[in-house]
Structures are given as C-alpha cells and as structure tokens.
Amino acid sequence: MTDATFLQSFLQVYPHFGWIGSLIILTGCLVSAVAYTGKADERYSILNHFISELGEIGISRSAAVFNTAMVIGGILFIPYMVGLGLTIGSWWAIIGMSAGLLAAVSSILVGIFSMDRLTPHRRAAMTFFRSGLVTVVFFTIAVFAQPAGHRTIPLVVNMFGIIAIISYAAFLAIVGRKMDTNNQPNYILDPSVMPERPKFWRTAFLEWMLFFSTIAWFLLVSLFVLGPQIVV
C-alpha cells in the first residue's frame, strides 16, 4: 500500500474513531452514574457533581468503567483529531488538531490518574480543559473559514462549537479565580472542601455543559463527514 493510498483510506475511516470514542465515553459516564452512591449516600447528579467523581476509586462503584472509557475514548480521539485536521487542511485546523492531540492524551491521563489521586488528576484535567478550549476555538474558526463552494464540514456544527467555547471559557474563568484565591490548587476539583454539597454547583454544571457540547460537536462532525445523507 502506497502512502497516498493509506492516507486516502485513513481519511475515509477516521470519523468512526470520533463517534465510537464519543459513545464509549458517554456510555462509561452513564453506567457509572447509575451505579454511583456518594459519601453522603447521595445519588449522582450533573447539577452538583463533577464528571471525575464518577471515576473516584473507593467512592464510585463503577469507577473502573468510567476510567477505562476515558482511556479508550482518548486513544480513539488521537486518530480522529489527525484525520479532522487533515480533512479541513487549513492552518486553523492544524492548530486545532495539535491542541486536540494534547486534549486526547490528557483524557487518557484523566482515566489513568483517577480523582482519588487528586494532584496528578487535577493537572491532567486542567490540561484537558485548556487544550480542549483551544481545540474547539480553532476548529470552529476552521469550519467558518472553509471556501463557500467546498465545505467539508457544514456550518451548523458550529452551533455546538460556540456553546462549547462559552462553557469552556466560563468554567476556566471560575476555576481561575479559585486558583488565584486559594493556596491549595487541588481545591478547585475537590468536593470535600465544601461543608455541604450545594443542590446546584455552578462549576460542576458548567463542566458537564462543556462536556456535552464537545461530545455533540464530535458526533455531528463525524456524521457529516461520513455522509450528509445520514443526518436529518
């Protein structure tokens, strides 16, 4: 197989890495959330629990499911990011691809360093959030900047890209203020610092919003690249 043939074959199959990786992570979250019982015997809620609490060994009964899903999903996102960057082909897309590769590796590390190992977990998670923001920003620009007559990715996917950008920015702004006003950087992702878990935790909810919007963006892009006829 020549390099050109390999590249052509890769660009035909890479979207599958995107939707399969997304569904694996979503399934891992769902399974571990259903089985979750917290320290206060509370059920899991996206309104006041961080995503990574699903992978906290010793607390989450299905932590292994969540952590394994994060590792597998992150591995699958590596070829997906490469394929997406090469498909669009602009410098905007190449920058987005580079940041996306860092985000994918960070996702793997989030699964390896679960929340019970808070210091390495925090570093992996914050790297994911920051690189994830850069990824979505530059791919969103790349989609907008496609030549009008040669759009590989339709503009409609940027609706979720913009929602993701807003969610990332709001989350990082809140987390940044906490990092500036507390001596312990792990405070930002440690639910135990709260004397009582609030019914609505803005930071945790924003984390879920950026997660859902990013996954939705990945899924839509994958489906459109595979074939516009399968999308209503």
Image (cartoon, rainbow, N blue to C red):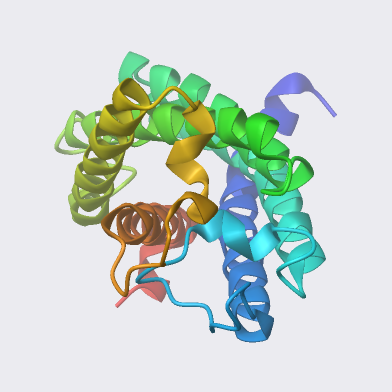
Asked whether, in this view, residue 123 is left or right of residue 97, the answer is right
Q: Which of 140 and 73 is in front in this view?
A: 73
Q: Position of residue 63 (x, y in %)?
A: 75, 65
Residue at 76% over, 73% down:
62
Tell me, yes or no, if residue 60 can be seen here.
yes
Instruction: Examine the image and state in which quarter residue 125 appears.
Output: top right
* Quarter of the figure that contains the N terminus: top right
Q: Position of residue 73 (x, y in %)?
A: 67, 52
> Residue furthest toward the left?
148
Question: In this picture, is 225 found above or below 61?
Answer: above
Tell me, yes or no, if residue 10 can be seen here.
no
How many numbered marks does the figure carry? 0
Q: Nearer the viewer, residue 77 or 174?
A: 174
Q: Which of 26 and 179 is in front in this view?
A: 179
> Residue furthest toward the top?
91
Residue at 65% over, 50% down:
13
Instruction: Examine the image and state in which quarter residue 5 appears.
Output: top right
Q: Where is residue 52 in the image (x, y as percent from the top left)?
A: 58, 55
Instruction: Examine the image and state in which quarter residue 171 appears.
Output: top left
Residue at 43% over, 19% down:
94
* Quarter of the figure that contains the C terminus: bottom left
Asked whether, in this view, residue 226 is left or right of residue 64, the answer is left
> Residue furthest toward the front?
195
Residue at 53% over, 34% down:
186
Asked whether, in this view, residue 183 is left or right of residue 19, the answer is left
Q: Where is residue 7 in the image (x, y as percent from the top left)?
A: 67, 30
